[in-house]
Amino acid sequence: MMVSQEDIERLRELLARPVQNIVLLAHTNPDGDAVGSLLAWREALVEMGHRVTCIVPNKYPYFLDWMTGVENLVLFKTDEAGVARRAVAESDLIFFLDFNAVSRLEGLSEVVESNTTARRILIDHHLSPGPGFDLMFSCTGSSSTAFLIYQILEK
């Protein structure tokens, strides 16, 4: 299954609203696909004029330090200032990138569940997405979530 034009239109409607607070989340023990997807999607959303916070539950592997923008990732596990909690609480949209269930966020899942007003959008290539998403780009035939992000941006 590839990205449908109907879902793209729904996403465009959500993103067409004036400046929004948007949170991008990746799974615990984020890999290159998760981190790359966060950073690419962040770049696109910032260009659209949105305020974007990228949150990972814990540290990504050191060999991903070369990626442009990794300094913009908030590490929930070491976030003593509460940046992640505040961003999630104030978010209008929450994107779940490269994972298919809120439970894969460990301690961060409770913070996410406490925001009952934000729209939830899943972009993922893994099997069996969980419930609770307002919009899903779940394409198991895709090689990566990063490729799905590319497809969405190209349409």
Image (cartoon, rainbow, N blue to C red):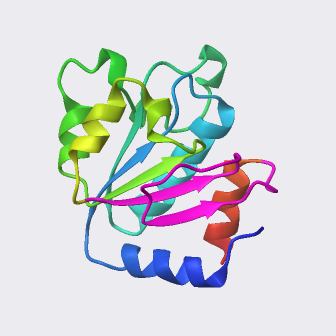
Question: Please, is residue 130 above or below residue 26 in the view?
Answer: below
In the rendered image, the vertical position of residue 38 relative to residue 92, given as above or below: above
Residue appearing at x 63%, y 25% in the figure? 64
Residue 25: horizontal and vertical position, in percent? 44, 42
Q: Residue at x 78, y 67 (%)?
A: 1
Residue drawn at x 53%, y 49% is: 130
- Where residue 106 sits in the image (x, y, percent)? 41, 24
**Which residue shows up at 70% across the image and 46% down it?**
126
Question: How would you classify the magenta stretch by its main secondary structure?
Answer: loop
The answer to which of 72 and 93 lies nearer the viewer is 93
Question: Is residue 125 covered in magenta?
Answer: yes
Foreground of the two, 71 or 111: 111
Number of marks present in the image shown: 0
In front of the other: 137 or 46: 137
Q: What residue range appears in magenta? A: 118-143
Task: Residue 17 in the image: state x and y as whole percent.
Answer: 30, 78
Image: 15 above or below 125: below
Where is 116 relative to 76, above or below? below
Name the side, left or right, on which 25 lies relative to 145: left
Q: Nearer the viewer, residue 69 or 141?
A: 141
- Residue 150 locus on image (x, y percent): 68, 61
Q: Is residue 151 magenta?
A: no
**Quarter-wise, where is residue 136 in the image?**
bottom right
